[in-house]
């Protein structure tokens, strides 16, 4: 469970989602005075507006309708607390699946492959992830395998320096798979605990992206058959439903094990986290809650929902 300071920070980050979803639902109930078809239709629109997504919104409203029927509330005037409590429970069920803890090698080196579209905060998330484990006393090596952009490698070096993690890089245009190979070898030679791999995210060249990720995967498997231990997709919460499209593309290219949701600021509609979790059945492992080196937190659904509904 998060501390109270972080709970308050999450409340600030989810203010837009709270207004477009929770406050809207309560306003609808006050206006209608009962749970009827008109209220449910408008609630479905509110869910979609909060970036919960069409499919997930439709199924949520259908489940709410069934719950109302079972409790004999459909068409009856009832306390608004029932609507709030039931909606919160339905959202909790969708955020439930999957372990938020990262998987590590039983012994020796662990390898984390990080993927995502350029501009999602991927490299920043890697730096924060590295810092998290360095602070725990682990030795971390970063692989700058986004060789398409020189700026990406330079940015990773800056984050590596801040987090006190070694960075393995090459020249722009270097085969990304060779950087990954070098990073794994460097990790072994230094008796490191973790190698975290940054990758390119050029969705406009989807076929090239898939080939690149597949080659990186082959190199990792050749060196360490049980790796990567985690393949995490970084998504920008401000992109809304476009994030779901991105997630589906990357899921086709590489077997994903979890998500890092970044830029969960006061402008983002956090409902996208529910849509992605519901549609892809992937656990949200971390959320970015600020610009600082320590502002990457393990996702906790109870605190997320407490912040959303409070």
Image (cartoon, rainbow, N blue to C red):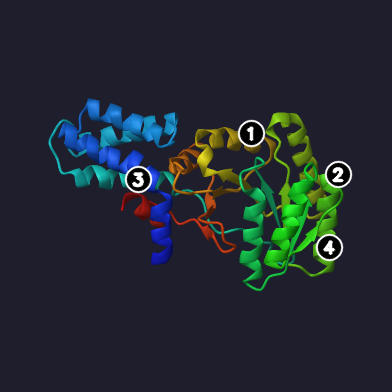
In the rendered view, tell whether residue 228 sits above or below residue 109: above
In the rendered view, tell whether residue 144 sits above or below residue 32: below
Residue, disc 1: 249
Residue, disc 3: 18
How packed is label 3: few (under 14 Cα within 10 Å), some, or many (20 or more)? many
How packed is label 4: few (under 14 Cα within 10 Å), some, or many (20 or more)? some
- The Cα–Cα distance between marks 3 and 2, rounded to whole angstroms, is 45 Å
Residue, disc 2: 175
Count of labels shown?
A: 4
Q: Nearer the viewer, residue 231 or 71?
A: 231
- SS type, badge 1: helix
N-terminal of the two: label 3 or label 2?
3
- x and y, in percent, of residue 140 in the image: 72, 65
N-terminal of the two: label 3 or label 1?
3
- SS type, badge 4: helix
Of circles 3 and 2, which is in front?
3
Figure quadrant of the N terminus = bottom left
Of circles 1 and 2, which is in front?
2
Where residue 215 sits, quadrant-wise, is top right
Residue, disc 4: 186
N-terminal of the two: label 4 or label 3?
3
- The Cα–Cα distance between marks 3 and 1, rounded to whole angstroms, is 29 Å
Tell me the residue at 21%/34% (across/down).
69
Q: Nearer the viewer, residue 6 or 212?
A: 6
């Amino acid at each position: 469970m998060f501390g109270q300071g972080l709970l308050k920070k999450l409340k600030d980050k989810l203010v837009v989602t709270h207004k477009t979803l929770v406050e809207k639902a309560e306003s609808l109930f006050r206006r209608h005075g009962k749970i009827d078809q008109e209220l449910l239709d408008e609630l479905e629109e509110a869910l979609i507006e909060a970036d919960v997504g069409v499919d997930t919104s439709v199924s949520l409203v259908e489940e709410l309708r069934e719950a109302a029927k079972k409790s004999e509330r459909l068409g009856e005037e009832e306390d608004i607390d029932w609507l709030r409590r039931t909606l919160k429970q339905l959202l909790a069920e969708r955020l439930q699946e999957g372990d938020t803890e990262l998987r590590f090698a039983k012994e020796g080196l662990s390898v984390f492959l990080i993927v995502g579209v350029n501009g999602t905060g991927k490299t920043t998330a890697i730096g924060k992830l590295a810092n998290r484990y360095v602070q725990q006393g682990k030795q971390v090596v970063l692989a700058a395998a986004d060789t398409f952009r020189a700026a990406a490698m330079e940015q990773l070096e800056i984050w590596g320096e801040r987090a006190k993690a070694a960075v393995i890089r090459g020249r722009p245009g270097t085969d990304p798979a060779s950087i990954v190979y070098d990073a794994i070898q460097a990790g072994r030679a230094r008796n490191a605990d973790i190698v975290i791999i940054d990758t390119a995210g050029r969705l406009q060249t989807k076929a090239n992206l898939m080939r690149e990720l597949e080659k990186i995967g082959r190199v990792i498997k050749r060196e360490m058959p049980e790796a990567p231990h985690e393949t995490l997709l970084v998504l920008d919460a401000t992109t809304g439903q476009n994030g779901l499209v991105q997630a589906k593309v990357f899921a086709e290219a590489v077997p994903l094990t979890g998500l890092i949701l970044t830029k969960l600021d006061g402008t983002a509609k956090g409902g996208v986290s529910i849509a992605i979790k519901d549609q892809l059945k992937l656990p949200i492992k971390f959320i970015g809650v600020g610009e600082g080196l320590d502002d990457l937190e393990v996702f906790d659904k109870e605190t997320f929902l407490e912040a959303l509904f409070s």
